[in-house]
Image (cartoon, coloured by chain):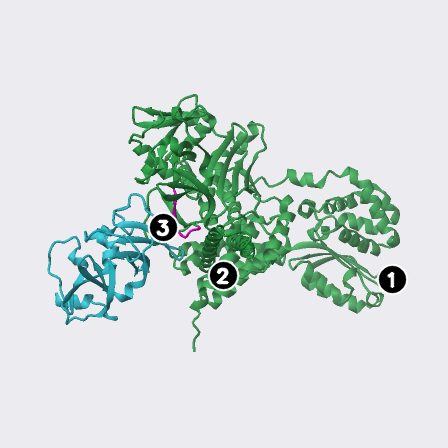
Amino acid sequence: MQAALERSLPAGSGEYLTFTLGQEEYGVDILKVQEIRGWERPTRIAQAPPFLLGVINLRGVIVPIVDMRIKFNLGEPSYDQFTVVIILNIGRRVVGMVVDGVSDVIQLNSDNLRPAPEFSTTLDTRHILGLGTVDERMIIVVDIEQLMSSREMALVDTPEQA
Amino acid sequence: MSIDMSQFYQVFFEEAAEHLANMEGLLLALDVEAPALEDLNAIFRAAHSIKGGSGTFGFTDMTEVTHILETLLDRVRKGELALVPEMVDAFLAAGDVLKAQLAHHQGGEAVDEAQVRDICERLARLSDSGTQTASRPVRYWVECSLAPEIAADAAAVGHLLDALAELASCEIEQRPSADQPRLALWATTAHGEAALCEALGFYALPEDILVRAGGPQKAYGLFAEQDPQAAQTDEPGHGLSEQAPTVPTSAGGNEAAGYGFFDDMPGVSAAQGQTPAATAGDAFGFFADAPGVPPAAPTVTEAATQRAAPQVPSPSHVRRASDDPSVETVRTGRRETDKVAYSATAETSSIRVSVEKVDQLINLVGELVITQAMLAQSASHLDPVAAERLLAGIDLLARNTRDLQESVMSIRMLPMSMVFSRFPRVVRDLAGKLGKQVELKTIGEATELDKGLIERITDPLTHLVRNSLDHGIETPEKRVAAGKSPKGTLTLKAAHQGGNIVIEVMDDGAGLDRDKILAKARERGLAVHEGMSDQEVWQLIYAPGFSTAEQVTDVSGRGVGMDVVKKNIEGLGGRVEIESSPGFGTRTIISLPLTLAILDGMSVGVGGETYIVPLTLVVESLQPRPEDIKTIAGEGRVVAIRGEYLPLIPLAEVLGQPAATLDLTQGILMVIEAEGGRAALFVDELLGQHQVVIKSLESNYRKVEGVSGATIMGDGRVALILDIAAVTRMGLNLNRRQYGLKAA
């Protein structure tokens, strides 16, 4: 497991952007983050899953917006001027992710990153790179690329859906 | 140090492809009987450029093929070989092989070696057989007036005759002497006119030399030897009359027919008939040598011409009647105009830019349009007096943006000739295979269309052309029996019509057979009845797998095709219509939007969101009266509009908009046309009409049913563009929930 963990850890910065969803704190590889924006009401899309809020115009590019709080059943989603959208670059796609707030950027390495135990949650443990500890806080480090491309997010056309 | 050539490969590929296309076009336009030298030269140059390029980049397989091709072409253009139809076929086949090789070098599949060898052999064989033709001895009549001092010198004359004897076997008719400087002889040689002229060139001025191949020399010979009065007799008059038609034909500008005529006339060399002036000149030169005639000769020619002309049947008709009945796709009569158009396109200077860059530019301009719309919207709240200058500036910006957008869009525009140019070949090959005679006419080749559309319209058009050839145009026998000319006409026409481009494929064949289609439809279990309108019956041929062909051939008959054609064209936002009348032909009309990047749309509001409906599909909008809305089985709703019942589709429901108006009398009904039928979309409100820039939803998300794309509105928000056909389908499936009719 440790070997797998080391392999899956990005060789790059080792820096993670942390954000809060409800009471929990999550981390994503900072190199996947394109920008952080304020809330803007997206255009709804018919027959989309509830966590897909719709699409916005990001300087001429149509970008889908997902709300992770709805996806993970974390607290009541509220949208106001403090709501934050993290714009992620996943492969060649751009996706926006609504979170409760962005905390800071932290350094994590294999010393303070522990594998997540196997258990059943809405967040498949396969998408969790590990659990990091910084100042007694537990940070759930998510493999955001894998999560966003996964079938459950329904963000990508897959042969099964077609 | 080696230079990495691969970076230039792409340029070579593009150029070679262009040269090949160019070559094919020229070959197809070539009049086999009288090829224009400049066309032959252009074909040769194209082959030569490909050879040079492929050699430079080390594509030796292509070099080999082009080399053989070039050798043959070179001989043809130098006049050593006569062009025959087999050569054109071989050239076209060689072009195909080269195309395949080019595709292979671009990462395509390997070329069939046997095919390459086959074409090389074929070309080499043509080249060889041609050599034999050329080297077959030809009997020439040689006449030459020597300078008196040479004629007087018996040794010099001897040398001359020796030189000629080396080249040819000579029968001397008149040996020059001091008092008669004229040399006349029959020379039988395989070396051609040029060699004879060259040999004589040492002793005489070129204008004094006359070398003619073949027969009418008899007349000339007679003429020359007789006294001037003989010109008044009928005998030489006939001789002259053979030349006389040159004047009317050439003057009419139909060089091809002129050539053809002379080709067939025994013995008059083709080179002679080029212009009336040349003919007169030749005649003059000839007569000048005849003793006693000189000054009178031109007059005699004229007189003889006038006298002889009425006796001569119209030369072009003679030629036409004996015309090779094989298929010709491009007519000589149109050659002149073609050439003008062709040279016009060839001369415009151009630069090569990758499509990516152009698309980027188009995207940026799209952004600019959105920003401009945003500004205009914000400025509309300003006080026109206080902000007069700002508003004027915004107006100007709007105009400039529109102009800019138009010019940028025009970069992507390509002429329809890009598509049409492939059909002469298709028609030629297919007509040959089917044993039909077909003339292809193209109209409106300069009509411009978006590059994306050009690429995607080619396949459907090819289907339609093949269909017309196979099912439409009848065999020559049937056509003659029906009282039509044995040669069918297939017309391709492109034209602008409003914001659309209309492409027509028209044939003068048998037309669609209504009874046959109905019978076939019944056989296939489709819902049909005798009372259907023609238009409805014609629509049946779009059903998947539908074919009335009695037998499946490799051309058509499998019934795949028309449904694909319709689907493809509808996928491009276009429509297909068929008009047909039995015995007179069929016309398929395709109308397409000019571009895929911009759409004329009607924006509608549903539950607070904005959606765009393509304007081309909107028939009308109206506010329904409660009594017009009826239910069927308590669920499905229809609305009566001017006596017609249309299914009612609540857009909010299809799109899952809970907040929408449910009261039908409070909203607007929009009658739309989709998939051959009509339906009424129920929306909350109409917002306006816009030109919207189409953005892909799929680049960052996935395909959404009922939505064909997205756009950005003036306020910066995203609006979804509806795929009306899909929305209608979804709506008809879902027409369940009860709508309240408050007023009812």
Please count the marks in the image.
3
> Quick check: is B606 in the magenta stretch?
no
Q: Which chain's residue wears label 1? A: B
Subunit under mark 3: B
Name which residue lies at 49% across and 39% down.
Answer: B590
| Residue type for callout 1 | Asp
Residue nearer the viewer, B247 or B677: B677
Does residue B87 lie above or below B535 as drawn? below
Disc 1: which residue: B179
Residue B719: within the magenta?
yes
Q: CA distance from mark 2 to mark 3?
A: 27 Å
Task: Give whichever of B1, B377 is nearer the camera.
Answer: B377
The residue range painted magenta reads B714-722
- Chain the render paints cyan: A
**Which of disc 3 and disc 2 is earlier in sequence?**
2
Answer above or below: position of B16 versus B472: below
Q: Nearer the viewer, mark 1 or mark 2?
A: 2
Residue farthest to the bottom, as pictured: B1
Q: Mark 3 vs mark 1: tell me if same chain.
A: yes
- Find disc 2 in the rendering and name its residue: B353
B303 to B355, vertically: above or below: above
- Residue B398 position, x and y percent, is 53, 53
Q: Earlier in the sequence, mark 3 or mark 1?
A: 1
Query: In this figure, which residue is indicated by the disc labeled 3?
Result: B697
Which of marks 2 and 1 precedes in the sequence?
Answer: 1
Q: Dot 3 surroundings within 10 Å: few (below 14), some, or many (20 or more)?
A: many
**Is residue B400 visible to us here?**
no
